[in-house]
Image: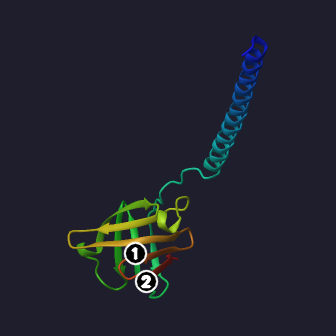
Amino acid sequence: MTKPMKKGILITITGIVIIGITYFGIEMFDFAKGVKEDAKKSEIEFQQNPIIKLTEFKNGRWISTVDSLAGIEIKNGKWIMFYKGMETDSSDVYDFKIRREYIKELETEHKPFEYLTITNDSDTLEYSILEYSSELLSLSYMPRGNTLNYEPEK
């Protein structure tokens, strides 16, 4: 091989290497730009969906929408079931806790379910909180799935 031929091959190989480095540099830049855009999008979604506080029940009395004599009273951290005209005893008084769960299979990662568990010495009852507002307290009794609706006592 002659010296000019070796020089031509060396220049060709150098050119290919420079083109390759330039190509991969551009690809990496595009990749990094995409990652940055995804991160920004996630940040915007996070800002739009701030962490929602757990439901906090306020003291008050709620009357069943089905039976106007049945109700619940939330008082000083206790959940009290009552029936007008009947004496309330200790088996009607419960402690309660609220917990939140995200059910990935139902695609609720951004819309969690809240559950209410009430307990006393003789019983534990589990509800899903459907709605809690100044106008309505709506619960779903977990074992059966029936809905219990209460309005504030007037």
Going by the picture, which residue comes out furthest to the top?
A: 3
Placement of 40 over or under 116, stated as above or below: above
- Residue name at image x 24 percent, y 72 percent: 90
**Mark 1 secondary-structure assignment:** strand
Q: Amino acid at mark 2?
A: Asn
| For the residues bearing labels 2 and 1, Cβ distance under 8 angstroms | no
Q: In this figure, which residue is indicated by the disc labeled 1?
A: 72
Question: Which of 124 and 88 lies nearest the eye of the viewer?
Answer: 124
**Mark 2 secondary-structure assignment:** loop
Whichever of callouts 2 and 1 sits on the residue coming sooner in the sequence is: 1
Q: Is residue 112 left or right of residue 38?
A: left
Between the C-alphas of marks 2 and 1, the distance is 17 Å
Going by the picture, which residue comes out furthest to the left?
A: 121
- Residue name at image x 54 percent, y 74 percent: 136
The quarter holding residue 101 reads bottom left
Going by the picture, which residue comes out furthest to the front?
A: 1
Q: Residues within 10 Å of mark 1 (few under 14, many from 20)?
A: many
- Residue name at image x 20 percent, y 69 percent: 121
Going by the picture, which residue comes out furthest to the bottom?
A: 67
Placement of 78 over or under 8, stated as above or below: below
Q: Residues within 10 Å of mark 2 (few under 14, many from 20)?
A: few
Query: Number of callouts in the render?
Result: 2
In x, y percent, where is residue 23? 72, 33
The quarter holding residue 15 reads top right
In x, y percent, where is residue 35? 64, 40
Q: In this figure, which residue is indicated by the disc labeled 2?
A: 146
In x, y percent, where is residue 1? 72, 16
Question: Which of 47 and 40 lies nearest the eye of the viewer?
Answer: 40
Q: Tell me how the rendering is colored.
A: rainbow
Q: Is residue 64 left or right of residue 110?
A: left
